[in-house]
Image (cartoon, coloured by chain):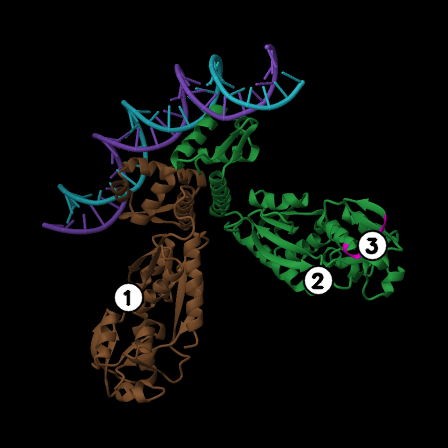
Chain colours: A brown, B green, C purple, D cyan
Amino acid sequence: MLPNALRYFLEVARIGSVNGASERLHVAGSAISRQISALEMQFETPLFERKPRGMVLTPAGEKLADYARRAFLDAEDVAAEIRGRVDTLRGTIRIATSEGLANVFMSEMAYFFREKYPEVRFDIHVVAPPNIALMVREGEVDIGIAFAVGTPIPVHVVRRVRVTTVAIMHPNHPLAARDHLTMADLANYPVALSTPDTTLRQVIDMRCAAEGVLLNVVMVSSHSAGLMHFARQGGAIAFASPISVRTWITDGLLVARPFVEDTAFNRSLEIQTMAARKLPRLVDDFSRFLADEIGGQIAL
Amino acid sequence: MLPNALRYFLEVARIGSVNGASERLHVAGSAISRQISALEMQFETPLFERKPRGMVLTPAGEKLADYARRAFLDAEDVAAEIRGRVDTLRGTIRIATSEGLANVFMSEMAYFFREKYPEVRFDIHVVAPPNIALMVREGEVDIGIAFAVGTPIPVHVVRRVRVTTVAIMHPNHPLAARDHLTMADLANYPVALSTPDTTLRQVIDMRCAAEGVLLNVVMVSSHSAGLMHFARQGGAIAFASPISVRTWITDGLLVARPFVEDTAFNRSLEIQTMAARKLPRLVDDFSRFLADEIGGQIAL
DNA sequence: TAGGCCATTGCCATAGCGGCAATGAGGCTC
DNA sequence: GAGCCTCATTGCCGCTATGGCAATGGCCTA
């Protein structure tokens, strides 16, 4: 459907070397090298920088790669459509998100969406937050759901919503009686934190630094669901965004207490799709559905 | 850049015959026929209906053609971008519109837009109204500006605005003293109409029929600018939408008087782009600019 | 019924593509 | 600092796929 040159080019961009792409594509490296040269001739500019350890895209190459990725995804969708499959309401939605969001939030969203589209299948990739936008950009997933991080990956943000951070605790916890908390309030109680590479941890650290508070950290985990269960058993106070724990709160298993002065140190939740990509009908519907849902939750 | 098969396919779709495409592309008809067969093999479905007088797309073929057109335009844009030309603010915007809109409205819009982007060039195609959406769809122009007609051409409508119809006359015309008019008011004066294939004429005819009024028609022309000048000289009352005559009104050369009960028999002005196409930066800017402008004029 | 326009098919030449092996450039290690 | 390893690139060769030409058969029109 699309010329091999573009396929090779894209694979080299992904893998970072001709030989690597050669193995993966089962095509001789020479052939790949030639096709890329041809493209560079055609555009009259180098598409890769030749580094000693492989090849990395030049700015021009980035542009072409963006185009090629779009074109391939688009072609796939069209082919599926023409073949009669996946016309509107059945199909797979590929999502990349972080562990904290995959747990409650994505489960809920998937559940509700499937009430409208029972034939939908979800492929949920739980990956490190900085990789989410990358996967969206490379077309490995259709939708990324992530807390915005200072990275300027050029993806399309369908919606961005500021979410607060709340303290999560057992319903009988002494602080559960309070309406609002400060970091200083927590200093006397054990807390459970996520690892420093998470956005959640970063806002908590910033807040502590700002208030000059040293927390009594009894658990650090990269698995937020584990932290929540730990808090549920009364072991510590944990932290989360409201949407990450919604059902647990409404079920009364945990209580969430907001912090005073909640405007600072908040995160932005983003729904991301590939820039300029024509989304398949189903994916588009889901992205709108998500946008509506988190739009409604912005008030909490 | 893209496979020849798609180029051939698209040309056959455009022209409607293999032989026609053969001449145009300087490629043997047999080669074209083969490539199309190959595509049909690949998709396991016919893309054309073979009629005695040529070939017309099947629904599956339509889908593929839409894709191919997008891909080619997109590829062109990317190529231009990579080559360094047309990065952001210089370039050509191709527009299809009707004669009535090309006259005052497009001139104004182009003029104002060029104040922000002095390097812009406009290619304005004045065509019969039903062809505007077709040209947009086939990618022959970037933007279509047209009054909505009951045709279900699948293009993307950036904005749709209901526009009223007003009577246009010399400032000294007796009816210029009135605030609002009915069709019956006009019956005693000579009027100038556009040809029956225009949307403007259609709403006027409908309005006359509804009110049971027979107009004193002294001129019919397919050239709306001529009708306006005729009105300006006092020869007759003409008709237009407010945006089509704006500068003439503000300059005091003509006066426009609205009709009572203006909700019925109005037209919708549409700004159209190719469905699901990634617009070049400049074109996108202009479409937003237009949308803002006509959005602001909806009140008139 | 003859002629014209249409797409398709068979046959052939060739340009383009991919495989293999050699070359050369640039780090890494001992 | 010498040898080795990992790269990408180039020359050569075989093959596939593509395009040109001419012939065929279907369908409509004069």
Q: Nearer the viewer, mark 1 or mark 3?
A: 3
Report, in whole angstroms, how far the alpha carbon at label 2 lies from the one at label 1: 54 Å
Q: Percent x, y for residue B169?
A: 84, 57
Amino acid type indicated by mark 3: Val
Is B212 included in the stretch rendered in magenta? yes
Q: Position of residue B279 (x, y in %)?
A: 52, 51
Percent from the top left, x then y, of residue A264?
40, 79
Q: Which residue is mark 3?
A: B213
Provide the residue span drawn in magenta. Answer: B210-217
* Secondary structure found at label 2: loop
Residue at x 23% of width, y 81% of height: A236
Instruction: Give the amino acid type for the residue marked by disc 1 in the picture.
Output: Glu
Residue annotated with mark 1:
A99
Looking at the rendering, which quadrant does residue A111 occupy?
Answer: bottom left
Quadrant where the N terminus of chain A is found in the figure: top left
Q: Are marks 2 and 3 on the same chain?
A: yes
SS for tag 3?
Answer: loop
> Gap in Å between the C-alphas at discs 2 and 3?
19 Å
Asked if residue B204 is among those painted magenta in the image, a careful observer would answer no
Q: Which residue is mark 2?
A: B263
